[in-house]
């Protein structure tokens, strides 16, 4: 059996703070340890001990991986792997969701031949929200985001191919990148139709391969809520 565990980093905003769309160009520290430690505690409960731990080379992902490894009592070092860094949100990098939806809503209006100035902020927000919804449901990249979908798919496929028989690998990444990982099952469209592909902070996804191909056995589990 081969096992690939993919986890999203912990929180980078405190309760009450206004979050922004944080991509690969914004390197924030974690503001809590619960989610990272929860990943390690839950995997330990399941008896899953990684032989290798990879993480995107950002403070939030490396920090989360280190916390998980500490809880696992895992002596193997966390290896930075740039392949799994968060996507680049282009002009929406580090912007609030309200700002993002307003910009995307204006683009949608123009595509429909409508002057954005003729629409209310609520109408623009709704059009922008529809674009974000497609990103969260089907991984359709919004306008002007710098996301090379094929490269991300190739990176997940390469990692899956690297997992050796009997090996367990943990990779800590981010929401924008993780949503493409289920493509290793061979039916990404089907997976998107059945699952919420947006993984919460501290969420854990588990894929196994018994020789007949990769299967997702757990998706987006909030590990910190599962630990005893």
Image (cartoon, rainbow, N blue to C red):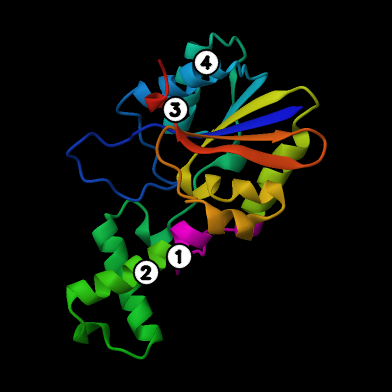
CA–CA distance in space, label 3 to label 2: 30 Å
Local secondary structure at mark 4? helix
Q: Position of residue 56 (x, y in %)?
A: 54, 35
Q: Are marks 2 and 1 in contact (CB under 8 Å)?
A: yes
Local secondary structure at mark 3? helix
Mark 3 crowd level (few <14, some 14–19, many ≥20, 10 Å Cα) = many
Image side of residue 197 versus residue 109, left or right: right
- Find disc 1 in the rendering and name its residue: 134
Which of the two discs, 4 and 1, labels the residue nearer the N terminus? 4
Q: Is residue 137 magenta?
A: yes
- Find disc 2 in the rendering and name its residue: 130
In the picture, the disc for residue 223 is 3
Residue lying at 36% horizontally and 36% vertically, measured from the top left? 28
Which of the two discs, 3 and 1, labels the residue nearer the N terminus? 1
Q: Position of residue 90 (x, y in %)?
A: 43, 59
Local secondary structure at mark 1? helix
Looking at the image, is 167 positioned above or below residue 206?
above
Mark 4 vs mark 2: in front:
4
CA–CA distance in space, label 4 to label 2: 39 Å
CA–CA distance in space, label 4 to label 1: 35 Å
Which region of the structure is painted magenta? Answer: 135-150
Looking at the image, is 58 positioned above or below residue 188?
above
- Near-viewer residue (18 or 209): 209
Q: Is residue 140 magenta?
A: yes
Mark 2 crowd level (few <14, some 14–19, many ≥20, 10 Å Cα) = some
The C terminus - image quarter: top left
CA–CA distance in space, label 2 to label 1: 6 Å
Q: Quadrant of residue 162?
A: top right
Local secondary structure at mark 2? helix
């Amino acid at each position: 059996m081969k096992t690939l565990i993919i986890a999203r980093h912990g929180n980078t905003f405190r309760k009450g703070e206004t979050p922004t769309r944080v991509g690969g160009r914004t390197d924030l520290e974690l503001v809590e340890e619960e989610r990272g430690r929860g990943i390690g505690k839950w995997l330990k409960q399941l008896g899953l001990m990684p032989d290798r731990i990879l993480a995107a080379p950002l403070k939030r992902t490396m920090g989360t991986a280190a916390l998980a490894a500490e809880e696992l009592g895992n002596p193997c070092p966390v290896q930075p792997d740039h392949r799994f860094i968060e996507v680049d949100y282009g002009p929406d990098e580090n912007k609030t969701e309200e700002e993002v939806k307003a910009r995307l809503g204006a683009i949608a209006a123009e595509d429909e031949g409508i002057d954005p100035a003729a629409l209310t902020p609520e109408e623009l927000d709704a059009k922008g929200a529809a674009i974000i919804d497609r990103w969260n449901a089907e991984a359709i990249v919004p306008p002007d985001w710098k996301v090379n979908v094929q490269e991300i798919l190739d990176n997940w496929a390469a990692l899956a191919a690297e997992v050796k028989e009997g090996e367990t690998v943990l990779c800590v990444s981010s929401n924008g990148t993780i949503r493409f990982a289920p493509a290793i099952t061979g039916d990404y469209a089907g997976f998107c139709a059945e699952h919420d592909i947006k993984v919460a902070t501290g969420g854990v996804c588990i894929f196994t391969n018994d020789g007949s191909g990769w299967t997702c056995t757990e998706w987006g589990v909030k590990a910190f809520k599962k630990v005893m």
